[in-house]
Amino acid sequence: MEPVLQVRKVTKIFGGMTAVNAVDLDIYPGEIIGLIGPNGAGKTTFFNSVTGFYKCDGGSVRFDGKDITSKTTYQNCKAGMARTFQIVQPFGQMTSLENVMIGAFNRTSSYKEAESQAKKWIEFVGMEEKMHDRVANLNIGDQRKLEMARALATGPKLLLLDEVMAGLTPTEIDDVIELVRKIRKSGITVLMIEHIMKALMQLSDRVVVLDHGTKIAEGTPEEIANNDRVIESYLGSAYKKAE
Ligand SMILES: Nc1ncnc2c1ncn2[C@@H]1O[C@H](COP(=O)(O)OP(=O)(O)OP(=O)(O)O)[C@@H](O)[C@H]1O
Ligand SMILES: [Mg+2]
């Protein structure tokens, strides 16, 4: 099977600091991949480099069989790559429905079609009761779900989630875990950055670890939880199996 995303030696340098250092990653259709690492490890910068938000300083990215290394975020979104932002970026004065319609216009120019698609995705994330609320009035949990709905409405093959569980209550986290499972079930491949290990470890097929911009490990959640280098740089021994 061909990978949906193939990242080779992707590098991003800010001034003299290498934020992402020659990172390789293959993601296959239907996978959920977790991306972890300490604060400042380069996870968000990796997303920005892969999606075209930043121009890479080295390396290449293939998406869905095509080289997209120098494509823009707009072109990549059309091609089927969607993402959420670590700091939510809603249009606060617009309603939930209107926010999600903006995503839906990626695939249609018809108002009616965008509206019906947006309604579908708002229901998918469980926010139908808040469809006509102004987004600025929603709590952070709902704003995160709404960002996911907006990204989903663009019609992605690959969805990149940047800490969608940060700041949520345990109940809201459980909702998002279920939501990510449902997204995969609907045929969308997921790459997610997450600091909430309990959630990430139960969702991910494979986990990739960045430290100081470099990939230091990749493996199943169990392999990663028992990897000495990952324990030392990030996880601690809390997830290690007792010997
Ligand atoms: N636009 C930028 N200009 C300059 N330096 C940046 C920029 N964005 C990020 N950095 C730096 O690059 C490094 C990686 O940052 P990044 O935000 O990718 O880390 P992260 O792994 O997402 O961290 P966190 O878990 O805190 O979100 C950090 O040292 C950060 O200060
Ligand atoms: Mg980040």
Image (spheres, rainbow, N blue to C red):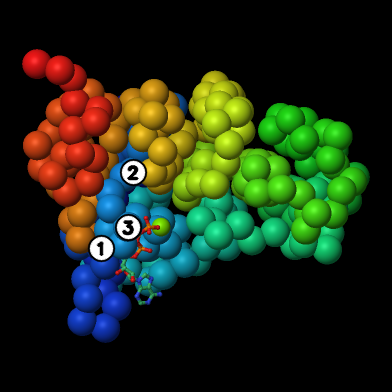
Q: Residue visible at 83% across and 47% down?
A: 97
Residue 4 visible? The answer is no
Residue 125: mark: none
Circle 2 crowding by C-alpha within 10 Å: few under 14, some 14–19, many from 20: many
Answer left or right for 49 relative to 141: left
Kindly tell me whether mark 1's CB lies below 8 Å from ligand 1: yes
Q: Using residue 11 as the reference point, say whether residue 186 is left or right of it.
A: right
Q: Which residue is mark 1?
A: 20
| 195 left or right of 72 in image | left
Q: Position of residue 199 (x, y in %)?
A: 43, 30
| Residue at mark 2 | 35
| Disc 1 packing (10 Å; few <14; some 14–19; many ≥20) | many
Contact, CB < 8 Å: mark 3 with mark 1? no
Three-letter amino acid code of the residue under disc 3: Asn
What is the crowding at mark 3: few (fewer than 14 residues within 10 Å), some, or many (at least 20)? few
Of residues 102 and 127, the one drawn nearer to the viewer in this rendering:
127
Badge 2 marks a residue whose secondary structure is strand
Q: Nearer the viewer, residue 233 or 16?
A: 233
Name the residue at 57% across, 41% down. 168
- Give the alpha-carbon distance from disc 3 to disc 1, as whole Å: 13 Å
Label 3 lies in ligand 1 vicinity (Cβ under 8 Å): yes
Where residue 29 sits: x, y (%)?
41, 30
